[in-house]
Amino acid sequence: MLARAHARAPILAHRHSPKTLNRSTATARRATTRGRRVVCSASDAEPAGETIVTSSVSGGSPGDDPLANFRDGDLLLLRLDGSEEAKLATKLASKPLLDREWFFEVVGATSAQLSQTTPNVPETNEAFEEKNETVGRSLVGLCRGVAAFLTWSAKDGEIRIVPVAKKRDVGERTPTNDSYERCSPRLAEREWVKASFPSWHALLSDLESTGEYPRDPRSVFRSIDRSSIARVEKVTDYDALRSTVRADPSYWRDGAPAGFVETDPKRQATNNAGELLALLEGHRGVVMTQLWAGWEDSDSQQPVDAPFALRALRECADDARVAIVPASVPGMPARKGLTAIISAAESPFLEQAKHLASFGAQAALVAGSPYYQYLVGRILGYKEANIDAHVRSRGGRLTAPVVREAEKDLEALSESHGGSLPWREATSGSDRVAASGFFFLDAKTDASLEKSEKSGKRGGKRGGKKKKTSTVKSVADAESMFGGRGKKKK
């Protein structure tokens, strides 16, 4: 249990300053592979080396469809032509790492999956293909949190990205509203989100009603011309990421060592998903993921917009052995900040997750006192050397009394002290995608609904500690209370 508050406050500090403890859950700006080779399958795995591109295709001339070999779960990097990249280079240098590249997560193709997932849908969207002069498949995917088609023109050889949005929103080149209904996540309408993430579902409905999220495609794609994509590179895929996490989870499990700063957007793109996969594979007992960061600029991506993050969250929602506990910034509505604390649904991990929620721990806010920095780091399973390095980087010091008090409080949470990892055998991954098509769609028999009805543990209400009341009225007040806003990471 918690002892005197004055011994530990402030609890949190804004995580826009460089962080060294947790690489992933705040703003999707940290690494995924720390120099590890990105491979297509487990059989291709090699010892640590440089991140590589597994394949690359170029547009520019008619011929065979260069997008034909990409599949659901592939992560692509869209390369602009030289003149466009040169224009954007200076502007992008001041942006967060994830905003410096155009990543496209493939979720399917119009010719293959639409007819399987949506009744009475033709084999291809002929009107869309005729309007955009495309043949064969148009890839459906997510780019910076926005659903889009990646198309290739047989007439001029151009590769284009076209938002999947309501026709009235983005002009005549946009696919029909029917395409929007079929190919957009539309999270506020999904039963699996409502069942497993009720607080997030309510927030998403609110944000959609005000036009704040999902973001306007015109805003997202304003800096990229649809005809300026010179080539498409495959960076990795979801199964490859899972295989890498399964083979060596240390990067996603141990926390960041002293002085670590990621500089490669390709390596950090899937870090959020990597930590969630480490949990799903049994190598983490508790993970925090920021579902909404209300302090981010309107033109910035949300943490869940990072590649594979939403896909991994869906897998967590479908897993009967995983618990999801919501946590808001103390004293403030969810739109100011909302975190999902995701854990193994067993002791001591579930009790630890509920404890984090009891004082409003946020994935994108750094603990502001050595006690809470140590407590959060221990619950998240980081190495003590990395926790100590994090505390020192924030100007603090771990004293023997602080460590003893935190350990005493951790022991009081559950009779199962410590918990052993891995807490489960390696998984084979979710088979829901094969049954239902695009991963964000509701399954015909929704496992998350069944799990919610049986266990009653969604939302973290049962058995958790009551949240303390707070006089905090705004994010600015919270930042002042928790240690102040840091400088943005360049």
Image (cartoon, grey):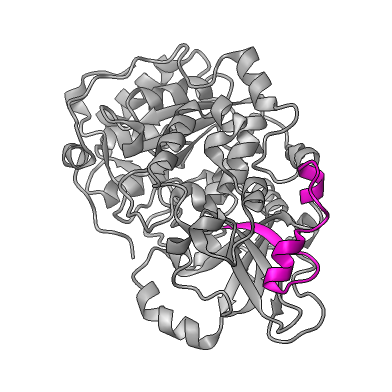
Nearest the eye: 216 or 241: 216
Among the 4 quarters of the image, the one containing residue 328 = top left
The quarter of the picture where residue 8 lies is top left
Residue found 58% across the figure and 20% down from its top: 346
Foreground of the two, 313 or 283:
313
Q: Is residue 435 above or below residue 393?
A: above
Residue 55 lies, in percent from the top left, at: 72, 73
Locate the C terminus and report the quarter of the image it occupies.
Answer: bottom left
Q: Position of residue 132 (x, y in %)?
A: 68, 71
For the N terminus, the quadrant is top left
Query: Where does the image place residue 333, in percent across and percent down from the top left?
Result: 31, 31
Q: Is residue 466 left or right of residue 143?
A: left
Q: Inspect this view and state whether residue 13 appears.
A: yes
Left or right relative to 72: residue 264: left
Residue 90 lies left or right of residue 216; in this view the side is: left
Q: Is residue 37 magenta-colored? A: no
Q: Residue at x 79, y 48 (%)?
A: 121
Percent across and percent down for residue 247 are 69, 49
- Front in this rendered view, residue 442 or 383: 442
Residue at x 81%, y 52% (from the top left corner): 122
Taking 97 as reference, is 351 above or below it? Answer: above
Total number of numbered discs in the rendering? 0
Residue 282 visible in the current orientation: no
Q: Which residues are magenta?
A: 114-142
Q: Please report the residue visible at 40 percent of the width from the left and 22 percent of the height from the top.
A: 355
Q: Is residue 119 magenta?
A: yes
